[in-house]
Image: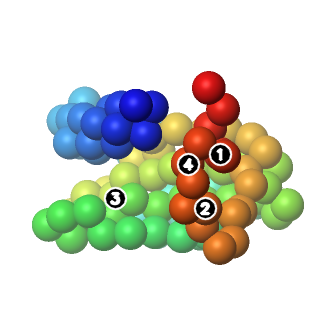
Amino acid sequence: MFYSFFWIVLAVILVTWPLAVQGQSFCMKHSDFVVTIAKEFQETLAGHGILSDKQVLAVFVSPRGATFTVTFTTSEGITCPIVAGHDWQNISPPRTNMKASYPG
């Protein structure tokens, strides 16, 4: 049940986020964002995926996962942070049983 709910919520966020962030000052040209996040948080690109129409979802992580930032980049090359946090954990290979990752 949680697994289905998670994907529905994620889909809604990814579809509506570009509309919500238009004109917000925390969005910037992708190359400027990469330089800024590296300088301020020592975060570098850990992974990314193409969503649609050349839109990209990416995760930037600092050394040893101290902090992380999830971003959305538009087809025009504007990058906006979606969420940031701490204690990032890489899981390799990816888990097939989501219940093992999310208790409850």
Give the residue drawn at x 65%, y 73%. 93
Whether the residues at callouts 2 and 4 have beta carbons within 8 Å, the answer is yes
Q: CA distance from mark 1 to mark 2?
A: 8 Å
Percent x, y of residue 91? 69, 64
Up/down of 44 relative to 89, above or below: below
Q: Which residue is mark 3?
A: 73
Give the residue drawn at x 74%, y 55%. 89
Q: Secondary structure at mark 3?
A: strand
Q: CA distance from mark 2 to mark 4?
A: 7 Å
> Which sits in the foreground, 50 or 98?
98
Whether the residues at callouts 1 and 2 have beta carbons within 8 Å, the answer is yes
Q: Which residue is mark 2?
A: 95
Percent x, y of residue 60? 60, 60
Q: Secondary structure at mark 4?
A: helix
Q: CA distance from mark 2 to mark 3?
A: 27 Å
Of labels 1 and 2, earlier in sequence is 2
- Which quadrant would the N terminus be assigned to in this image? top left
Of labels 3 and 1, earlier in sequence is 3
Q: Which mark is residue 98?
A: 4
Whether the residues at callouts 4 and 1 have beta carbons within 8 Å, the answer is yes
Q: Is residue 4 left or right of residue 81?
A: left
Q: Is residue 48 left or right of residue 13?
A: right
Q: Amino acid at mark 1?
A: Ser
Of labels 3 and 4, earlier in sequence is 3
Q: Amino acid at mark 3?
A: Thr
10 Å neighbourhood of mark 2: few (<14), some, or many (≥20)? few
Q: Residue 97, located in which quarter of the rendered image?
A: bottom right
Q: CA distance from mark 3 to mark 4?
A: 27 Å
Percent x, y of residue 29? 38, 60
Q: CA distance from mark 4 to mark 1?
A: 5 Å
Q: Which residue is mark 1?
A: 101
Q: Amino acid at mark 4?
A: Met
